[in-house]
Amino acid sequence: MATRTGDGLWQQKIMLPEHKQMYEDYVASLDCRERIELDEQEVEQISRALQQSMQYKVPLSIRMYDPFERVQVIGVVENISKRYGQYKVNGDWFSVDDIEGIEVDNEPC
């Protein structure tokens, strides 16, 4: 990139690909959201809500962690894999570790 300085001279700026990538990574990290830590009670409530959704077909609104945007998974839990720490909604698998909160749309009778 060539720029003109105040004294009328042209100055050439060269950026190596590695430096460009580091700069892009740095700029992207400025907008990153931090992962929240859940306490034991919240983890238990999340586990209970997932089980109830699967057993009683209760729709959930699940707030998920994503470093750049708000992600919400809405639907009924179809399956839970404790071995892999995942749950399935609308045919897609999600990590239980990424759950930040759950709202139960309808409590079972």
Image (cartoon, grey):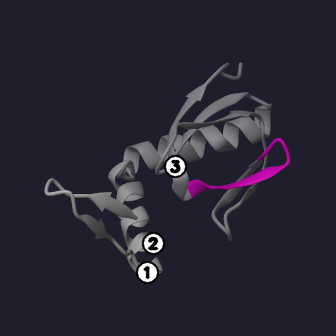
Q: Position of residue 69 (x, y in %)?
A: 51, 41
Nearest the eye: 52 or 22: 22
Q: Position of residue 50 (x, y in %)?
A: 65, 42
Which tag is nearer the camera, tag 1 or tag 3? Answer: 1
Query: Circle 3 is placed at which residue position?
Result: 66
Which image quarter: residue 16? bottom left
Magenta span covers which residues? 89-96
Quarter of the figure that contains the N terminus: bottom left
Query: Circle 2 is placed at which residue position?
Result: 21
Q: Are marks 2 and 3 in contact (CB under 8 Å)?
A: no
Q: Amino acid at mark 1?
A: Glu
Q: Is residue 39 visible in the rendered structure shown here?
A: no
Q: Helix, strand or loop at disc 1?
A: helix
Q: Residue at x 63, y 63 (%)?
A: 85
Query: Circle 1 is placed at which residue position?
Result: 18
Q: Helix, strand or loop at disc 2?
A: helix
Disc 2: CA contacts within 10 A as few (<14), some (14-19) or many (>=20): few
Marks 2/1: CA–CA distance: 5 Å
Residue 91 magenta: yes
Q: Helix, strand or loop at disc 3?
A: loop
Q: Are marks 2 and 1 in contact (CB under 8 Å)?
A: yes
Q: Is residue 64 left or right of residue 2?
A: right
Quarter of the figure that contains the C terminus: top right
Q: Position of residue 97 (x, y in %)?
A: 53, 58
Marks 1/3: CA–CA distance: 26 Å
Q: Amino acid at mark 3?
A: Asp
Residue 53 magenta: no
Q: Is residue 21 above or below residue 4?
A: below
Q: Amino acid at mark 2?
A: Gln
